[in-house]
Image (cartoon, grey):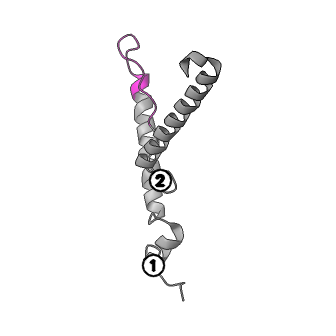
Amino acid sequence: MVEHLPPDGAAARAANGHAWQQSDYTATDSRDLLALLLTAFLNANRDPDKQPAMPWPEPGWRPGDPLPEDAEAQAEQDRAQARTAFDHITAQVLPSKG
């Protein structure tokens, strides 16, 4: 009964958790490769005395990766947790700071 449902229909999206098809993955891989090639070309043809090397580009987002907002919120939470741990250790080692 479900054999003839479309691959981009609601049932497939619910099973996969996203609506990406193979062509979407291929397009994203091509964009990432083009960005890498452009960066390599620009770094190879720059004047080392006048220009710093460009950083390598980040790969594009794909299903299963955290959303940029989620990643930034998680990073902020990690920084707050690290700061709390640092303050706790500092208070134990240096009683005058506590």
Residue 55 horizontal/vertical position (percent)? 44, 28
- Neighbourhood count class around disc 2 (C-alpha, 10 Å): few under 14, some 14–19, many 20 upward: some
Q: Quadrant of the N terminus?
A: bottom right
Please identify the residue farthest to the bottom as the structure is shown.
1
Residue under numbered circle 1: 6
Q: Which residues are magenta?
A: 42-57
Closer to the N terminus: mark 1 or mark 2?
1
Q: Determine the residue positioned at 59% across, 23% down.
A: 91
Residue under numbered circle 2: 62
Please identify the residue farthest to the left as the structure is shown.
50
Q: Amino acid at mark 1?
A: Pro
Residue 54 horizontal/vertical position (percent)? 41, 26
Residue 18 horizontal/vertical position (percent)? 46, 65
Q: Determine the residue positioned at 50% across, 51% down.
A: 65
Q: Determine the residue positioned at 49% across, 72% down.
A: 14
**Mark 1: which secondary structure?**
loop
Q: Amino acid at mark 2?
A: Arg
* Residue 30 higher or lower than 17, as above or below: above
Say whether residue 87 is left or right of residue 49: right
Residue 90 horizontal/vertical position (percent)? 59, 22
- Neighbourhood count class around disc 1 (C-alpha, 10 Å): few under 14, some 14–19, many 20 upward: few
Return the residue nearer the eye: 64 or 46: 64
* Residue 84 higher or lower than 59, as above or below: above
Which image quadrant for residue 92? top right
Q: CA distance from mark 1 to mark 2?
A: 22 Å
- Mark 1 vs mark 2: in front: 2
**Mark 2: which secondary structure?**
loop
